Image (spheres, rainbow, N blue to C red):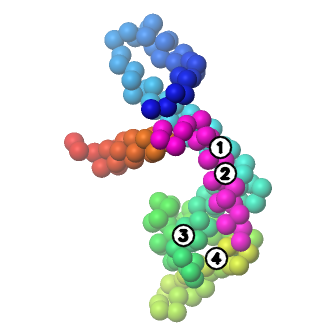
Amino acid sequence: MSSTPKPSRDAVDAIIDQWAVVRPDLDTAAMEVFGRVWRLSRTVGDRMEKAYARFGISRGEFDVLATLRRSGAPYTLSPRRLSETLMLTTGGMTGRLDKLERAGLLRRSPDPHDRRALQVTLTNKGLAMIDDAVEAGLALQTEALSALDEEQAGQLADLLRQLLAGTVNPQR
């Protein structure tokens, strides 16, 4: 067990206290968790957005390039597969692909196996850039996580995985 001191009260504690005064009948335990999850996501997300901006891309554009990179060589997927993976409409995906192609980070070409389809491939420039951007983003995430020791970070990851599974695939 870690001997890390309990942090001082935060903005979520103040909100919970206010609810306790005006609505003492409410069980605000969920608000304590999700208020902090939302604030953490917003804070780290904003930092990530700034880190990616140094590479000339947004968080959404990072996601496209990272998805191609994770697919492995030759770093090629169909626009449909990208849309499904990132849960985007085809229109939303087209806008991102247009910008990334203009920047020389990916290219669209006919699918050699289906003349009606396209494929999207990282360029060498895109591959180098996404490798640098993912390292920059991971450095920020690691810095944020440094408030916890390794055991706590693992426990948090496990608890969040469990919570996420329960919201994505509810048992009810």
User: How far apart are the two marked residues, 3 and 4, measured between alpha carbons?
Assistant: 11 Å
First to last magenta residue range:
128-152
Q: Is residue 123 above or below residue 29?
A: below
Looking at the image, tell me whether mark 2 or mark 3 is earlier in sequence order: 3
Q: Which residue is mark 1?
A: 143
Residue type, label 4: Leu
- Identify which residue, 118 or 171, lies in the foreground: 171
Q: Residue at x 50, y 36 (%)?
A: 37
Q: Are marks 2 and 3 in contact (CB under 8 Å)?
A: no
Q: Quadrant of residue 96?
A: bottom right
* Label 3 sits on residue: 70
Type of residue at label 1?
Glu
Q: Nearer the viewer, residue 2 or 53?
A: 2
Query: Which residue is depicted at the point 50% across and 66% down?
Result: 83
Callout 3 amino acid: Arg
Q: Nearer the viewer, mark 2 or mark 4?
A: 2
Q: Which mark is residue 139?
A: 2
Q: In this rendering, would 139 be left or right of 161? A: right
